[in-house]
Image (cartoon, helix red, strand yellow):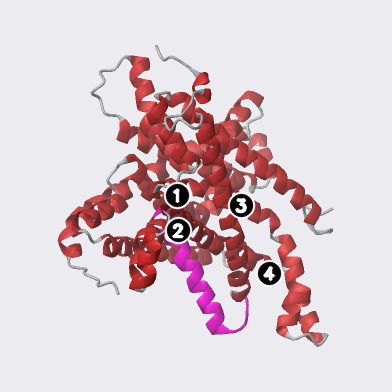
Amino acid sequence: MYEFDWSSIPGALPFLWDGMKVSLEITALAVVIGIVWGTLLAMMRLSPIKAVSLFAAGYVNLFRAVPLVMVLLWFFLIVPKALEQLFGLPTGTDMRLTSAMIGFALFEAAYYSEIIRAGIQSVPKGQIGASYALGMTYSQAMRLVVLPQAFRNMVPLLLTQGIILFQDTSLVYVSALADFFGAAYKVGDRDGRLVEMLLFAGLVYFVICFSASQLVKRLQKKYHPA
Amino acid sequence: MNYQWNWGVFLQPSASGDDTYLGWMFAGFKMTITLSLTAWVLALLLGAIVGVLRTVPNKALAGLATAYVELFRNIPLLVQLFIWYFVLPELLPTAIGDAYKQSNPIFQQFLAAMVCLGLFTSARVAEQIRSGINSLPKGQKNAGLALGFTLPQTYRFVMLPMAFRLVVPPLTSEFLNIFKNSAVCSTIGLLELAAQGRQLVDYTAQPYESFIAVTIAYVLINVTVMFLMRKVEHRIAVPGYIGGK
């Protein structure tokens, strides 16, 4: 039978914490970019201008058809080289990590935009009509009337997507970004204690995501008592 | 930009000599499809059982099913995959573990990937099945019981035939997800589509062509599955419901 040896974990905690900070940073960045860019995409998708709505639909459908791993590899391996060649940058500039992070955010924005689009569509049509009747422009109606109501309805879904996104950050493993999972794997590999470190990483993710999802559930009950 | 586009590279004989690079891609494509479909069967079977258990009055069984769903939903897929692949063989009794580790490496990768994807997805399928059962009018269950059916009979003859049909549209998106999630299995060295893409970049030095081809392959899978599922959804829709005939 396998003999567990957890002794390499305490010493590795500062390193793991650094990794966790990277994971949280990527999560925060992707949530912010995802919501901002996702809102714009959702509004573009609902725009009466055909070209604009087609672009948004194409963007969202493309990113939703391709696995996150592929998107990360594109932005880690291909995009930096293409930018170098396009702008004639010196080959030493290492943009791979920034590029991978941006790719991650662009990917998540496609998923956020679908949530936000549904949220916007859940606001009764009369609200826009009323705003126009009051003399508002389209952007005023969106900003002051529709979006505030839409976002209020969407809060639980946006947060749940945030939890999924936090789990997705582990996939930056393919781009050699040292996030929490990458750090745990490195320590386990170095000390020959992969079994313990992987189980520990799983436990940490579980505790964080489970508590977060219970919080979201409670929030949902508070705002939308069934 | 002075990149030399060369789409002909796919027809060149590959480094291993007995195949073309297009053949490599096709091998990866087949692996992605085989892996996703077998994992999907596992996910449907387990998901249906766990989803039903979540709705039964027996507290212990329902609690167990809830624990199952929460466990698989709150750990990232990549971590689960590494646990199946690196950790579990170590925890098996030595004899079995050693026999497993000496088996064909492709078999080991495939088994870990299939079980991992299947169980990961089954938790999501279970949630859909549960909400399908819960969306049925309460009267259906009561009517079944009032007619003298036992609870299992009520499930078998009244509730499940309806719930399974209602749940097909939401399951479509899980079905699409399993193909996309299968790309994660490239991390343990399984040569599916994404892994073949990386390999093509290394061997052909034509990164754009390789990645564009692999990306198109994923889009094709996505479009095909959506098209087929739309047909299934149409055939199976319950008259009288939104989306029904």
The answer to the question of whether label 2 and label 3 lie on touching residues, with beta carbons closer than 8 A, is: no
Residue B119 % position (x, y): 51, 63
Please state if A158 lies on the left or on the right of B53 as rendered: left
Residue A192 found in image quarter: bottom left
The circle drawn on residue B185 is 1
Name the residue located 52 percent from the left edge and 67 percent from the top edge.
A221
Local crowd size for mark 1, using a 10 Å CA cut-off: few (<14), some (14–19), many (≥20): many
Name the residue located 51 percent from the left edge and 25 percent from the top edge.
B10
Residue A80 % position (x, y): 35, 26
Q: Work out how far the residue at label 2 is from the one at label 3, CA to CA, in angstroms.
A: 19 Å
- The kind of secondary structure element at disc 2 is helix
The answer to the question of whether label 2 and label 4 lie on touching residues, with beta carbons closer than 8 A, is: no
Which quadrant holds the C terminus of chain A?
bottom right
Which comes sooner in the sequence, label 3 or label 4? 4
The answer to the question of whether label 1 and label 3 lie on touching residues, with beta carbons closer than 8 A, is: no
Name the residue located 75 percent from the left edge and 79 percent from the top edge.
B154
- The kind of secondary structure element at disc 1 is helix
